[in-house]
Amino acid sequence: MGSFRQHYAHVVRAALAFQAVGITVCTPALAEIVNPGAEFARFDTDPPHIPDHHIQAATLEKIFTSDFVYVVAPDGYIGRTTSYELGRVHERGIPTYYSEMPKDLPIDIPQDLVIDAACLAARLGTSAASGTASPARRRSRHRDP
């Protein structure tokens, strides 16, 4: 999860770190953004006839079935849509980790939830290897236009 319009390369790096240890990344589907600079980022994998709000609704469904969420927040920036999504995630109690402490987000975030994606992936991959979880069942989510 993070600002695709401003930090998509960071989101991709985080997703690849999780995939490298066998963690399924539900979203984004690492694809090309077809409308750079638009208000809502669309990918070449998004059906062009589907309205943005339907894509966002489908994304939220993926978020809500994730075992955890990882927020990519370079310099603390998360964007408006990520803020909205985080509110929904927070109310459901889905474990959430952050690349950096978000700015202008009025929820308590313990410092131990701020962790580099590669470090978190290694930690989760190690716990899975020790038998405490199956990496194939762990799903992470990153999506924000």
Image (tube, rainbow, N blue to C red):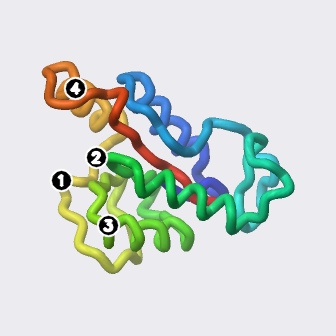
Q: Which amino acid does label 3 sit on?
A: Arg
Q: How busy is the neighbourhood of tag 4: few (under 14 within 10 Å), some, or many (20 plus)?
A: some
Q: Is 82 in front, or is 22?
A: 22
Marks 4 and 2, the one that precedes in the sequence: 2
Nearest-to-viewer mark from 3 and 1:
3
Marks 1 and 4, the one that precedes in the sequence: 1
Q: What residue type is labelled 1?
A: Asp
Query: Where is residue 24 shown, x and y percent of the image?
Result: 44, 33
Marks 3 and 1, the one that precedes in the sequence: 3
Q: What residue type is labelled 4?
A: Ala
Whether residue 12 sits left or right of residue 117 in the image: it is right
Nearest-to-viewer mark from 4 and 3:
3
Q: Which disc, if any, is residue 92?
A: 3
Q: Are marks 4 and 2 in contact (CB under 8 Å)?
A: no
Q: How busy is the neighbourhood of tag 3: few (under 14 within 10 Å), some, or many (20 plus)?
A: few
Q: Which residue is drawn at 55% across and 53% down?
A: 143
Whether residue 17 sits left or right of residue 60 in the image: it is left
Q: Which disc, if any, is residue 128?
A: 4
Q: Name the residue beneath numbered marker 1.
A: 112
